[in-house]
Image (tube, rainbow, N blue to C red):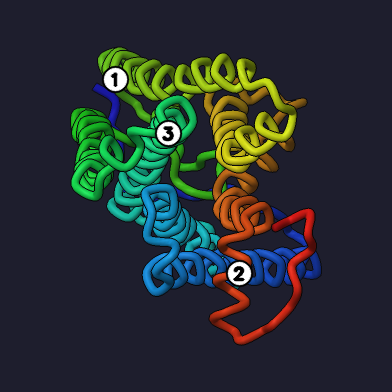
Amino acid sequence: MKNQTVITSVLLMSLSDDQKIIYVLFTAFLLIYLMTFLTNFLIILLVVTCAHLHTPMYFFLGNLAFLDMSYSSVSAPRILFDLSTQDWSISFPECIMQIFFVIYFGSSELFLLSSMSYDRYVAICHPLHYSQVMSWGMCTQMVSLVWFSALLTPSIFTLCLRRLTFCGPNFIQNIFCDLPHLLKISCTDIFINLLVFFIVGGFLGTVTFFTTFYPYVRIFSTVLKIRTSDGKRKAFSTCTSHLTVVFIFYASITFIYFIPNTNNLLTLNQVATIIYTLITPLLNPLIYSLRNKDLKAALQKALHIHVMIPRSCA
């Protein structure tokens, strides 16, 4: 039998060898991370402290902000550390832990976006029963189910990794530890792992995709029955922000995990990874806050800024 050395660390892909580019990237990523943390924290603070935001929609939005803040904190600090030290190695236990939380927060967002779709469905299709259906007890149960059910997927995936042996090479083509890239450096058969990942991931993706987009089929059919254009516009405006976040999230996942990494697409895949890990958690609060007059009003009241809101936004 050939001698094999089990690896104890993983070497991540460097973004650049040019020191000037590294300084630019470090500054840009640091500003993005700080803005992500502050904007999401501000939304959580407004949702908690402002009484008129104590509604199911903003309750889910507060959870989404906490989720984005947590997800960004899994990868961004490590990327900043690697850029500052130019040491792109990470210990194997830390790599497994990062994979666990990346999958956990990604799964949580899938479930949470599904819950927010259901909330919009009840608000538009059954407005008279909205307060009874989306009670605080119901909302708490839905969010608790989101956070606890999302633990199942990363637990299964990381437990399946225990049966594998990683003996080098220890280089992965990504800026943080991710499951598909880690499997490529395994020196044992990964067929069972791929089968489990395909079944569990396929089931999770199918269920969340259906529960996220099917309510909008009912929503669109209901909105099209509204006779006045103003009524249609108001109904659609309550869904635009959520739909935008959903499309950005699913597009990023599709490009990263379902499009193979060829030499021509490697750079684009890196860009998509950066967007998915750093930009998307920043875009979500901006998308909701810029299109939401209640959040604008709450922010102005909190900062004591008396600015007249244009009539078109009122």
Q: Nearer the viewer, residue 190 or 39?
A: 39
> What is the quadrant of residue 204 in the picture?
top left
Q: Which residue was labeled with disc 2?
A: 297
Say which amino acid is labelled 1: Val
SS category of the residue bearing label 3: helix
Residue 165: horizontal and vertical position, in percent?
A: 26, 32
- What label does residue 2 carry, if any? none
Q: Which residue was labeled with disc 3?
A: 127
- What label does residue 200 carry, if any? 1
Say which amino acid is labelled 2: Ala
Residue 308: horizontal and vertical position, in percent?
A: 75, 73
Distance between the alpha carbons at the discs numbered 3 and 2: 24 Å
When the figure is inspected, residue 273 is found, relative to residue 153, above or below; the finding is below
* 241 relative to 102 in the view: left or right: right
Say which amino acid is labelled 3: Pro
The quadrant the N terminus occupies is: top left
- Residue drawn at 61 percent across, 43 percent down: 241
Q: Nearer the viewer, residue 5 or 309?
A: 309
- Are dots 3 and 1 in contact, CB under 8 Å? no
Residue 5: horizontal and vertical position, in percent?
A: 30, 40
- Disc 2 crowd rating (10 Å Cα; few below 14, some 14-19, many 20+) is some
